Image (cartoon, rainbow, N blue to C red):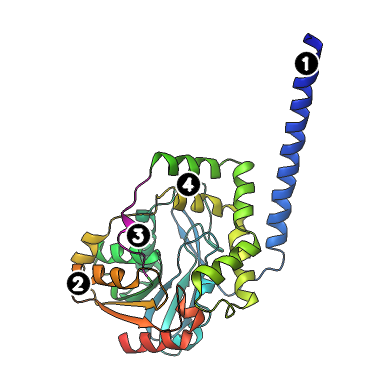
Amino acid sequence: MMRNNKYKLLSIGILLTLSSIAIYIFNKLISASAIFNNFLKTKDGHYYEWRFGNIFYEKQGSGAPLLLVHDLTASSSSAEWKSVVSALSHKYTVYTLDLLGCGRSDKPQMTYTNFLYVQLLTDFAKNVIGQKADIVASGLSGSFAVMACANNEDIFDKLMLINPSSLVSLNRSPSKRSKIAKCLLELPLVGTLVYNILNTKSNIELAFTEKYLYNPFSVDQSTIDISYEAAHLGNNGGRYLLSSIIGNYLSCNITHGVKAINNSIFIIDGEEKDHLEETQDFYKSLNPAIECETIPLAKQLPHIEVPEKVLEAIKDFF
């Protein structure tokens, strides 16, 4: 009986070891294959040596400074703005950056918070741009822009929010369940495996066709390829950002910031955005000076889907 138990334990140990090796090799293969084509080249960009990691950014054009801040997901990067940067650079000095934990920027093993990104935008404006700039922020990143303006009125002038997160969704806080999910995703082998499954190319394409775009057939393959590569750059370090998002550590009640800021604010929403009217009404109830525009035939990323409409809105507002 004793010998049989030893053999069982030995067999279990061997199986666990082999499974761990297989998962490790699988994770490494996914990471290597995802970045093989090098769609997100860095030769034309720069790095801002921030205290929490190096931040990749690009500077194009001439004129008044304009900062474009992409939405915050594990597959996000400044490539989100590729359809509008060239046109904007004829009139503005356009800055685009990969937020910490995204794209070509560093992806440190840490908990990411709303305040962390508020500090990043503030420091980037002060140390890289060096003068008061206009800012356009997409999705969740709009909350960082609002709080950066509320905390320091000298760094940004006009503020445009593209499909900002609803103020209700931003009022969430970490729960016991979300903390457990965060911890599981941060496990070295299993967490990386789960992250790789969540960020397969097919799942990223599904997010674009079902969540981000009004017309599911309007997404081009290069956008999917770039997003897939962005999710896996940095040895899949994006899982720490994703774990913080899932854990509700990026949520922050910004109602006081919306009320307090004196910046001119313009909100653009795609007509198919969920809870469109109530989100706009809530923002305007806190700050009646806020202007809103709804872009037809668009959803979460109008600057990808109908860039000409967004360029027109930027021209009119700024």
Q: Along the polypeptide, which appears first: circle 1 or circle 3?
A: 1
Which of these two is toward me, 12 or 44? Answer: 12
Asked whether the viewer can see residue 251, the reply is: yes
Q: Residues within 10 Å of mark 3 (few under 14, many from 20)?
A: many
Instruction: Name the image quarter holding the N terminus.
Output: top right
Q: Seen from this angle, which residue lies furthest top? A: 2
Tell me the distance, in whole angstroms, between the alpha carbons under discs 1 and 4.
40 Å
Q: Along the polypeptide, which appears first: circle 4 or circle 3?
A: 4
Which amino acid, by three-letter code, is at mark 3? Val
Asked whether the viewer can see residue 318, the reply is: no
Judge left or right: residue 234 versus residue 85. right
Which of these two is toward me, 163 or 136? Answer: 163
Tell me the distance, in whole angstroms, between the alpha carbons under discs 3 and 2.
17 Å
Residue matched to label 1: 6
Q: Residues within 10 Å of mark 2 (few under 14, many from 20)?
A: some
Residue matched to label 3: 118
Mark toward the viewer: 1 or 4: 1
Tell me the distance, in whole angstroms, between the alpha carbons under discs 1 and 3.
56 Å
Tell me the distance, in whole angstroms, between the alpha carbons under discs 4 and 3.
16 Å
What residue appears at the point 47 percent right and 46 percent down from the top-left corner?
A: 110
Residue matched to label 2: 262
Mark toward the viewer: 1 or 3: 1
Residue matched to label 4: 110
Which of these two is toward me, 235 or 23? Answer: 23
Q: Residues within 10 Å of mark 1 (few under 14, many from 20)?
A: few
Residue 179, how many percent across, how many down? 44, 41
Which of these two is toward me, 49 or 305? Answer: 305
Q: Residues within 10 Å of mark 4 (few under 14, many from 20)?
A: some
